[in-house]
Image: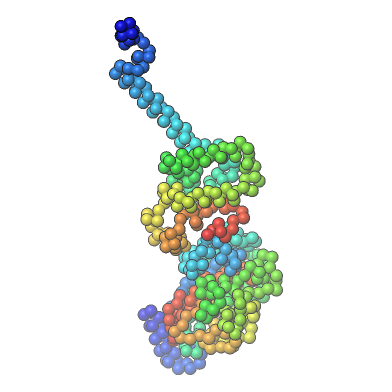
Amino acid sequence: MKKTMIAGAVGALLALGTGSALAAAPDWGKVEGKDITAFYPGVSPLEWIQKGTEHGGARALKKGETCADCHSDEAADMGKKMASGQKIEPTPIAGKAAFIPVKVQAAHDGENLYVRFSWKQPAASGAAKMDDKNPVKIAFMLEAGGKVDLADQSGCWATCHTDSRTMPGADEAKTKYVKGGSLAEGKFYDLHQWRSGENKGFDGYVADKRVMEGGKALVSAEGKKDGDTWSVVFTRKLAGGEGDVKLESGKAYNFGFAIHDDSAAGRFHHVSLGYKLGLDTDGHIKAAKQ
Amino acid sequence: MSEQNSDNSKQENPGGLWARLRRPSKKSLGGLLAVGFVVGVLFWGGFNTAMEATNTEKFCISCHEMYDNVYQEYKETIHYNNRTGVRAVCSDCHVPKDWTYKMIRKIQASREVWGKITGTIDTREKFEAKRLTLARREWARMKSVDSRECRNCHSFESMNKEAQKQRARKQHEMAVEDNMTCIDCHKGIAHHKPEGMTEEDEE
């Protein structure tokens, strides 16, 4: 907490010092980071995690535990099991990275939220490219108030279903969705993505289906690779339009992210468990005002 | 008089078998007790030795039904092979330790002998077809005795949850809270889970 406060104070001083009144990303060297392991999830959609005969944690989920309560320490091991095909992966890709350790940082300045992801590029599998335009894509989702069923517990899993595209036997036109998805009722996930090949940010949402564009919150998404380390910064207005979660200081939001590494598409990504992003409040990731 | 005489003669005849049985000397009484004791010990010892013989892993896997199916699966598990070198053999989990319960289980096992004779699971296909029924029977037995055989070695009290992985710690804390028993969660810990299990099996 102290560190965050100091970092916040230093950030504010720096901003004043440079006289920058424009939306400017914070000095990331001074923003506390949270290390989160994104792992290869195999075929583990929302239906699977709730099935007691398959997932021993289904009972815990019913009792209200979160995925991270049980699995945050073992994400890398889970990734190994699934990437190797030992568990719930009918078509393992030889050489596919099992997990990616990611540093997540966040800050805000009262107008914009800044989220930065950095990670070391894993070795390429050499497998056929699923998305030949984009070697890397990264996306994060936000949900407010736990209005979506299981959003408070399962992060992005609430959008991931057994009949979504690239799942075994699924319709290729069927995207992610949430149960009872409705923008009007606030039952949706806000979605932001950056694609390396197209070098472009996307601002969409997931409600009754996934929509990639049309959001009003995303200001910019910029990524670069220094040596073998990627860093991607999203700048997003706290406010927004339809399909954007409106962020307020003092509140925490459901947060999860995914990396499509190695030119992957669909479910062949690395995902984080569900975490909380707190704006000036407690959360796994804290976005303090700069 | 003559009657008395004859009575006397009976009494005075120490060689009479009947009399010797009816009024054994102290020596022979001691002898009888000693022989009885020895025979009893031998019988009891023999009975228990024979019963213990049926409790060995060797005995259990002498039937191909056990050797080819459940034994092969068990060999892949931590109850067979682990870092500390402690093994739980078939009977440790499937036969009660307490004598009375052990006897009851052994008598019930006569049904398994009948199954062996009639060949109810003598092929892989027959075994797989019956596996869920057999597993459910054993799960019900374990649940009805609060996983007594598991608890011969394991207990919540002696568990150091701090040393457990995050997931195990969480699950065990919930199990204590909800008064659950080992087999509620640990089905398939030593053998593959049967096909066709339902959500009720995991309740």
The percent coordinates of residue A51 (x first, y second) are: 57, 63
Q: Depth check: B99 or B158 in front?
A: B99
The percent coordinates of residue A211 (x first, y second) are: 64, 80
Q: Depth check: A171 or A54 in front?
A: A54
Image point (52%, 36%), residue name: B59
Q: Quadrant of the C terminus of chain A?
A: bottom left
The percent coordinates of residue B57 (x first, y second) are: 50, 39
Q: Depth check: A112 or A185 in front?
A: A185
Residue lying at the far left of the rendered structure: B26
Image point (45%, 75%), residue name: A284
The percent coordinates of residue B137 (x first, y second) are: 55, 49
Image point (39%, 86%), residue name: A9
**Residue A119 against residue B179 in the figure, above or below:** below
Image point (63%, 41%), residue name: B120
**Residue A66 against residue B7 in the figure, above or below:** below
Asked if residue A27 can be seen in this view, the reply is: no
Quarter of the figure with residue A138: bottom right
Residue lying at the far front of the rendered structure: B1
Quarter of the figure with residue A167: bottom right
Q: Quadrant of the N terminus of chain A?
A: bottom left
**Residue A212 against residue A49 in the figure, above or below:** below
Asked if residue A163 can be seen in this view, the reply is: yes
